[in-house]
């Protein structure tokens, strides 16, 4: 073990813990903040008898080996260099130890039931909390914060940022006057000439994960659908101002209808200079049916969309949109319209203005089509469309041509993008 001085950023954390028992730290990888927190917990245990009889909890991700590793690191703080062994005999399980009458136990994030009924919790460390599985992040927070009224413990969340919309970003967005946590942000600059050199950072900058691992950006894991280079090549400046939008340009709109707990994605594209340009890309949380229909109609006042591709799992919304834009609404007349198109060997999709698309049968071909467009260099994405860019960077295919919705950030705007791209099979 190499001894190092207390770094200035560690002093910032130490000072913060003296004035607030609830700390949120978004940090760059390699700063040693988890190690600092383990040492701080051990110091609280042995500095006096105040915490005797209490319990400290360390919440890790779902892998039990992570819990074991952190407890082992705590035990090794009491290593006897002369005897080359741990100086104290911790007669406990791999996931716990007792230190000066304080029981310290590590809990995987998917086994928090055992943590709910503890009598006297004095400290809770949530380590790499932004990487807990999505369904376990809020549960870990809830279980931790329920002890505030009961035993008033320290609660410390530490993590490198992961995907947008997760636990860390939700806390970061909370208003200062209502947020429970004192929030600290420590990017790679805190570690230069302390834990890594300028040369090491220069090499790390070549990695597509640098912005997340070192520069505190919510990017999620790097996906496996699109190569990082083709995404970066597509990101470019171009005008998306109203005055420069040519109403005669061919435009498409992809609509991924989501209601209830799912988001509602909308992407609008056009052809310009033989390139496909993104004009609008966003997704909306907790959408209302009528509000989303109204938003689309307002977008149509600005963008003269020629074709709408809509998730076919929402026939009611498709009917409403057809009615609002004046497409043939009489079912018998509409069916005859489609049959006539088939007789003339014209794909019905080519003459319909609002096209239902069923992901259950077309997910693979849509994913492959989008990949081809990007790899051929036909797509232009304005850098302001950060949700779409993040969704492309994090898109994960599960091996069967299906998008892994859990791994992909902003999957609803990604699905709207896939829908909008269908237009470019016909022009």
Image: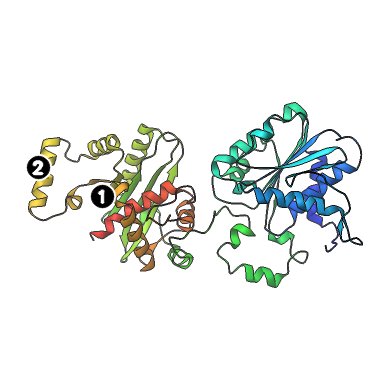
Residue 245 as seen in the image, left or right of residue 101: left
Callout 1–callout 2 Cβ contact below 8 Å: no
Residue at left 65%, top 48%?
64
Residue 237 as seen in the image, left or right of residue 67: left
The x, y position of residue 66, in whole percent, is: 67, 51
For label 2, the residue is: 336
Q: Residues within 10 Å of mark 2 (few under 14, many from 20)?
A: few
Q: Residue 197, relative to residue 24: is it above or below?
A: below
| Residue 344 image-quadrant placement | bottom left
Q: Residues within 10 Å of mark 1 (few under 14, many from 20)?
A: many
The x, y position of residue 212, in whole percent, is: 60, 57
- Dot label at residue 307: 1
Q: Secondary structure at mark 1?
A: strand
Residue at left 71%, top 61%?
189
3D distance between C-alphas at marks 1 and 2: 20 Å
Colour logic: rainbow
| Residue 149 image-quadrant placement | top right
Residue 178 can be seen in this image: no
Q: Secondary structure at mark 2?
A: helix
Quarter of the image with the N terminus is bottom right
The x, y position of residue 173, in whole percent, is: 60, 42
Residue 82 can be seen in this image: yes
């Amino acid at each position: 073990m190499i001894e190092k001085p207390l770094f200035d950023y560690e002093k910032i954390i130490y000072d913060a813990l003296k004035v607030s028992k609830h700390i949120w730290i978004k940090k760059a990888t390699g700063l040693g903040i988890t190690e600092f927190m383990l040492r701080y917990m051990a110091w609280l245990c042995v500095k006096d008898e105040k915490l005797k009889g209490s319990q400290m909890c360390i919440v890790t991700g779902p892998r039990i080996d992570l819990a074991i590793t952190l407890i082992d690191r705590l035990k090794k703080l009491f290593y006897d260099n002369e005897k080359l062994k741990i100086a104290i005999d911790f007669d406990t399980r791999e996931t716990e130890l007792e230190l000066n009458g304080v029981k310290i136990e590590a809990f995987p994030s998917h086994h928090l039931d055992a943590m709910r009924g503890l009598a006297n919790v004095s400290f809770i460390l949530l380590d790499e909390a932004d990487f807990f599985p999505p369904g376990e992040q809020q549960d870990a927070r809830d279980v931790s914060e329920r002890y505030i009224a009961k035993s008033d413990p320290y609660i410390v969340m530490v993590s490198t940022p992961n995907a947008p919309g997760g636990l860390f970003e939700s806390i970061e967005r909370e208003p200062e006057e209502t947020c429970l946590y004192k929030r600290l942000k420590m990017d790679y600059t805190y570690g230069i000439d302390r834990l890594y050199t300028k040369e090491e950072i220069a090499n790390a900058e070549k990695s597509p994960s640098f912005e997340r691992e070192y520069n505190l950006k919510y990017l999620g894991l790097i996906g496996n659908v699109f190569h990082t280079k083709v995404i970066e090549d597509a990101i470019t400046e171009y005008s998306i101002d109203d005055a420069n939008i040519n109403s005669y340009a061919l435009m498409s709109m992809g609509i991924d209808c989501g209601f209830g707990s799912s988001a509602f994605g909308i992407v609008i594209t056009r052809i310009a200079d033989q390139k496909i340009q993104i004009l609008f890309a966003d997704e909306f949380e907790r959408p209302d049916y009528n509000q989303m229909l109204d938003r689309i109609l307002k977008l149509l006042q600005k963008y003269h969309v020629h074709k709408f591709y809509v998730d076919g799992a929402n026939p009611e919304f498709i009917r409403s949109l057809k009615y609002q834009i004046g497409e043939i609404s009489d079912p018998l007349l509409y069916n005859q319209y489609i049959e006539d198109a088939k007789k003339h060997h014209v794909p019905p999709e080519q003459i319909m203005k609002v096209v239902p698309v069923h992901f259950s049968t077309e997910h693979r071909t849509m994913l492959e089509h989008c990949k081809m467009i990007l790899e051929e260099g036909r797509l232009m994405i304005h850098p302001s469309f950060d949700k779409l860019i993040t969704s492309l960077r994090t898109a994960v295919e599960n091996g069967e041509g299906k998008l892994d919705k859990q791994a992909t950030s902003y999957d609803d705007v990604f699905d709207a993008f896939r829908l909008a791209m269908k237009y470019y099979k016909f022009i």
